[in-house]
Image: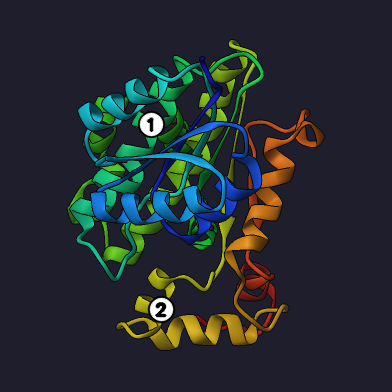
Amino acid sequence: MKQNVMLWTGAGQIGMAIARRMGYGMKIIVGDKKLENAEKTAELMNQAGFDVVPVEMDLSSRESICATIAEGQSYGPVKMLVNAAGVSPSQASIETILKVDLYGTAVLLEETGKVICPGGVGVTISSQSGFRMPALTAQEDELLACTPVEELLKLDLLREDRIKDTLHAYQLAKRCNEKRVMAQSVEWGKRGARLNAIAPGIIVTPLAMDEFCGIRGDFYKNMFAKCPAGRPSTADEIANVAELLMSDRGSFITGSTFLADGGATAAYYYGDLNC
């Protein structure tokens, strides 16, 4: 019997929190670059009554992305996308960040948009970092939003000699995510589907723990200590936002990026958060 399918990329805490909130009764395909991560997550979810199939998926590869989508389609119509895959500024090089977080996300949104079924919905996890950069020109924003995917990494503003460091690359990637969601939501809308993004702040996950112990550890600790919320967030709080966006209560919301950072960006611009 055919089932509605959720495609879920990135077998981490945020993706799992959203999948647990929205994936009951669905066939869930969880893809991760490390198959063992996907397998462990699938086992945990299946023991809780979900129906999860693990696959190996590399977000930097169009071929791998398309294979994951095809795996999902073999079980039924693709109804939901949860993209929580990516790398961080402390984990990867400029080249890898652009290939995974920027190019890979653009490919995933485009390819899923070609098959998403009517009434379908997608959410991609971006970052507050996209809001920390000076504004780009209208032309640069349009280039990030609309340039054919295979030409994205050839844009002048994404040349490595114009990117200061891995954090700057990450900010550019997340700004591109925001613009890509806006543009792709138009295409998804032609199929009767919706697409949004969430830009979290500091979320307590194993990835965040790596950041706290890395070269930018003091930067991040200062950020959540001085933000209005005064603390980091949990993955379940991001799932709260995703539940709104992916449920019928969010039926008039598409093409948007929701900033969920405890007020860190507000404090960065208008408070005493000197990062």
Residue 236 to residue 84: above or below: below
| Residue appearing at x 48%, y 61% in the figure | 13
Say above or below: 148 vs 41. Answer: above
Task: State the separation of the CA atoms marked 1 and 2.
Answer: 27 Å
Going from the N terminus, do you reach mark 1 or mark 2 first? 1
Q: Residue at x 45, y 40 (%)?
A: 52
Q: Which residue is mark 1?
A: 108
* Residue 216, picture quadrant: bottom left
Q: Provide the secondary structure element on which disc 1 rests.
A: helix
**Which amino acid type is shown beneath numbered disc 2?**
Met
Residue at which label 2 appears: 209
At 69% from the left and 74% from the top, the residue drawn is 270
Q: In the rendered view, would you say 133 is above or below 173?
A: below
Image vertical order of residue 182 relative to residue 193, above or below: below
- Asked if disc 1 and disc 2 are in contact, CB closer than 8 Å, the reply is no
Q: Quadrant of residue 165?
A: bottom left
Mark 2 Cα within 10 Å, few/some/many (few <14, many 20+)? few
Kind of residue at badge 1: Leu
